[in-house]
Amino acid sequence: MAQQSLIDTFKRAGQGQVFAFFDRLDAAQQQRLLEEAAEIDLAEIDRLTRTLLAKGAAAGVNLEGLAPAPYEPLPENGGNAADWSAARAAGEEALRAGRVAAFTVAGGQGTRLGYNGPKGTFPVTPLKQKTLFQVFAEKLRAAGQRYGKPLHWFIMTSHQNHAATEAFFEEHKFFGLDRGRVHFFRQGRMPAVDFEGRILLETPGSLALSPDGHGGSLRALDRSGALELMKSEGVDVLSYFQVDNPLVRCIDPAFIGWHLNRGSEMSSKMVPKAYPEEKLGHFCVQNGRLVVVEYSDLPMAMQKETDASGKLRYIAGSIAIHVLDREFIRRMARAGSDLALPFHRADKKIPTVDAKGEAVKPEKPNGVKFEMFVFDALPFAKNPVVIETRRADDFSPVKNAEGVDSPKTSREDQLRQYTRWLRENGAQVDTDSTGLPSVTFEVSPLFGYDEASFADSWKKLSPKPEIRDGLYLE
Ligand code: UTP
């Protein structure tokens, strides 16, 4: 009965094609298709079809009244040193009080990297070939030790990579973390549709489903019970970062402190764009609200605008590092469609089936995927704050197999970072003009995961080692 009523609901919604091959499926396949269909919010698909797919649906973003967003510059770039040290102190206090948890979004498909497996299991460090997950795990372990409070770590996976991610942590004994504090949960999925809004089948017995974007993390944190767990553990601050960026300071006391001292519901880090065409989103204000405008949505003429001193006007580039307030996440997750994160459409080549149920591998985009972006929460946040960070200390993602933002560039940036820490502490390291050392070595996050922790360990180290090929500081 329930089965027939679900099928009827799809038919009434003009989505009967989902069950076109139902009678050909065996019982297990039918069950699977029914389960997938039951997950779909048909009203949401209908709304997205009308708003994002209809002819004449607003193309591009509204740029009216857009202006560059203000941000807090680093002290070395004119920021207020007293405010920065007050922020650091407030962040450290929150960490010692156990109010902070880490959050990694790891549900992406990583198509550009083209690596077979969850992206977090990709090896990234220069010498030991540690994986992204190991790097973060060690940074979090070290931060927990430093502040005397082990951190909770939430990891959002996808349906595709959830089991493999959990198995990887098991296999590596959670990299020494307390397994009771590492929490995995799956993000939501959205069906792909054709250009008329009809849900696509991937095979005769399954829907073309894909992760609902990193913005889906807000709903997923709520749905999975993560927010309730945070509440019962006294955690109200979530440090958000992406799985592809080994340089990120997973836990940055100054950033956390800026967020708390300003009473912010969601805060972000910016780096000054290196050149106008750089592919970063831009922090802007519009109607008094903080927004991120993607590089593809901001006309190049505006990206090139400069101020009287010749500096780019739209200088504040988003690097997808945020701090979020727990109850703000809950509010966003439960908001009605007008106050919730919007979906964006992405036209894609979506493997599907033809009228006979035969597989089709399209050569050009044949449909649309819907995704939410976490930065779309910023306009809804009270007192959002954007702070500057040094790119070299926070951002070198692994996105592409080669070229910019690749394993090679990220590995080199890690080496440059170790080298800067060493030099700041008086060690001798030979480098080229970009700061890249001539030898390959590695600093474990357990030895130092930021300037301060590195300096502490280095001071205690006796005798000081020579910086040579193969050196591993742990
Ligand atoms: P990207 O935008 O780089 O996408 O994700 P991606 O899927 O990893 O890679 P491509 O575009 O297919 O090459 C940025 C971050 O957001 C996470 C990713 O895991 C990454 O940490 N993400 C993205 C999710 O967690 N879920 C999603 O649905 C999309």
Image: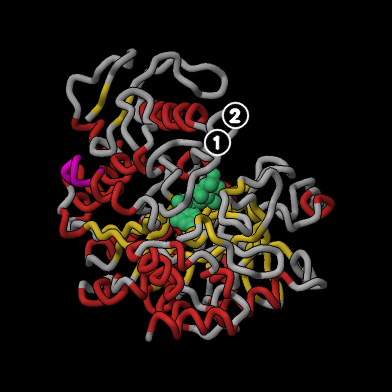
Residue 269, position as x, y percentages in the image:
52, 56
Amino acid type of disc 2?
A: Gly
Amino acid type of disc 1?
A: Asn
Give the labeled residue for mark 2. 403
Q: Which mark is residue 273?
A: none
Q: Residue at x 33, y 54 (%)?
A: 162
Secondary structure mostly seen in the magenta stretch = helix
Q: Is residue 181 left or right of residue 380?
A: left
Distance between the Cα atoms at labels 1 and 2?
7 Å
- Residue 77 forms part of the magenta stretch: no
Quarter of the image where the N terminus is located: bottom left
Q: Which mark is residue 400?
A: 1
Q: The residue tagged with tag 1: helix, strand or loop?
A: loop
Q: Residue at x 59, y 29 (%)?
A: 403
Residue 57, image quadrant = bottom right
Q: Residue at x 63, y 62 (%)?
A: 292
Residue 455, position as x, y percentages in the image:
30, 36
Quarter of the image where the C terminus is located: top left
One can see residue 273 in this view = yes
- Position of residue 11 relative to residue 162, above or below, is below
Q: Which is nearer the eye, 303 or 332?
A: 332
One can see residue 260 in this view = no
Q: Which residues are magenta?
A: 168-173
Question: For disc 1, does the CB lie below 8 Å from ligand 1?
Answer: yes
Residue 99, image quadrant = bottom left
Q: Residue at x 66, y 47 (%)?
A: 362
- Position of residue 41 relative to residue 281, above or below, is below
Q: Are marks 1 and 2 in contact (CB under 8 Å)?
A: yes
Crowding at dot 1, Cα within 10 Å, few <14 / some 14-19 / many 20+, comes out as some
Question: For disc 2, does the CB lie below 8 Å from ligand 1?
Answer: no
Residue 453, position as x, y percentages in the image:
28, 42
Q: Is residue 189 left or right of residue 294?
A: left
